[in-house]
Amino acid sequence: MKFAEMVMAFSEVSWVIVAFTLGMLAKRFHLPPLVGFLVAGFIIQHFPTLNLQLFKQLSSVGITLLLFTIGLKIKVKNLIKPHIWAVTSVHTLLTVLFFALVFKFFSWLGMTQYLGLSNNTLLIIAFALSFSSTVFVVKILEDKGEYYSRHGRIAIGVLVIQDIFAVLFMAISTGKPPSAWALGLLLLWPTRHLISRILNAMGHDELLVLLGFILSMGGSLLFEFVGIKGDLGALIMGLMLSNHSRARDMAKTMMSFKDLFLLGFFISIGLTGELTWMHIGMGFVLLALVLFKSALFYLLFTRFKLRARTSLMATLNLSNYSEFGLIVVAMCVANQWISASWLVTIAVAMTLSQILAAILNAQAHHNFVKYRSWWRRWQRKERLADDQEVDISGAEVAIIGIGRVGCGAYDSMHEYLGNRVIGIDINPDVIADKASPDRRMIQGDPSDADFWDRVLESHELKLVMIALPNINASMAVVEQLKALNFDGQIAATTHFEEEIEAYKDAGVHSVFNVFIQAGSGFTQQVLSQGMCDKILQGPASKL
């Protein structure tokens, strides 16, 4: 291979190396890798042989897959609750008005980027900044294992309502109403029965992934064809299947592909344009305005009868700027309403807001416990029925996480201890699916300090068994138990050998490696059923 060809080949993968290195560096500082990916974009833009089209395509596919998987996990009934749609509507309206007034004040002060902008343009920019990033929030929730938590479901609901606002805005602002063929999209609803039949015939192999790609990309293209934002098509295709028993399996199988393609999205933010000190300064100015968004979210959530902790966690998830801001500003640039430098300013503000949000979310549980009395000052005495604390009196063993392993552990323990065992899961759908008259299972968030406060005031717990698939979620539970001086035994499961030491250092007394010890359990079952008696009694058989 010639030297020039070697240089070319290296340049094709060098961006992956940069993204990987910065992602690892971010992780070393206990931040999500996506923080490193955001920073990587600003470095990669200076590469001599940059393929912008590649990142654009990766980003497009990643967002489509993300919205499809969100749709698979959403229950429509959750969106029609006032603390979702009303909070989102009021928050959007007040944020737009406040930001527009601040921008008008900046113009009056003579700040260059705001001079000469009409009131309508200022309102459009304010509207773009009122949104939170769907991509960022979902990634944070998944990394922390809190997607199905109370605050996670609220944050996702707010984001879906915001996405609906975005679609309506884009349809109105472009001046192009959907084509008459858009009415034909109503015929998609009956096709869910056919898709359900196909899903029932699927196994757990690559065909399930291929079907997910067909549905998400096909739904996006179909909506684009009739003049509606394609992302909405992917979301609706997921919603159509959200009640199917295989919906969660499909979402899990597509997770790795979605994360890979979303790498292109995070990097593409930094590829918006040449970075200058002016853009960085303006980015920090806009970052300060995130505080208003955060305070308003927290105030509205608590006024709608949510607990202080639920309100705070949902607020921290939503305390950032959205990729939608780039889309709206790009439209304004295309119409020559504002200068192209605004794209870089919004990209910087978005990156800074997501870095700050990542740091705050990483310390969220600790900070709530530390300043709990202050946060609770804003909490109303009256709360929503599904945000009440739970009672586990009489239980001596708590099994947290009612998946395949947790459910099996519960049934085995129940044979010995009866109702002195209780199962707890963050996802109400899991509880509804697994619960029965013979099983004592409740929905609750074990990473919630308030939850353990009530449990440990007069508890009888002697053993807590954590069967969660995510080490971050498991560690959050261990942290709460230790902070509240739980003196019983703690056991946890893991899929990875290297996590055992981390659990031990955190104070976990027993760690069960699911993969390794499952083989031992399999052997014990065979021996207990006498299946090896003949082998042990006689000579080795010949094949």
Image (spheres, grey):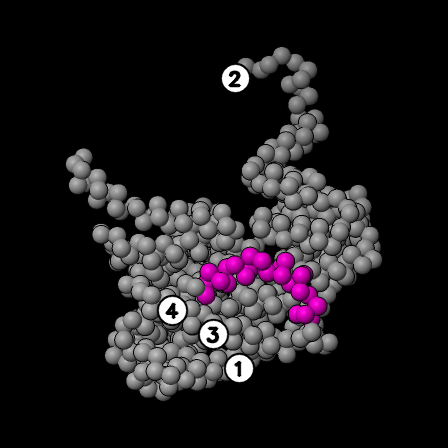
Residue in view at x 41 percent, y 63 percent? 351
Disc with the residue nearer the chain's start (1 vs 3): 1
Q: Nearer the viewer, mark 4 or mark 1?
A: 4
Identified at 52% across, 56% down, the residue is: 142
The secondary structure type at the circle numbered 3 is: helix
Task: Check disc 3 and report the residue beneath it.
Answer: 289
CA gap, disc 3 and disc 4 = 13 Å
Of the residues shown, which amino acid type is indicated by label 3? Leu
Residue 373 part of the magenta-drawn span: yes
Please name the amino acid that badge 4 sits on. Gly
Q: Select label 2 or label 4 by which is in front.
A: 4
According to the picture, the residue beneath numbered tag 1 turns out to be 90
Span colored in magenta: 353-376
Which dot, 2 or 1, sits closer to the camera?
1
Q: Pointer 4: what residue?
A: 281
**Is 542 or 526 nearer to us in this picture?**
526
Residues tagged 4 and 1 counted as in contact (Cβ below 8 A): no
Under mark 2, the amino acid is: Leu
Q: Earlier in the sequence, mark 2 or mark 1?
A: 1
Which mark is first along the chain, 2 or 3? 3
Which sits in the foreground, 249 or 256? Answer: 256
Mark 2 — residue?
Answer: 543
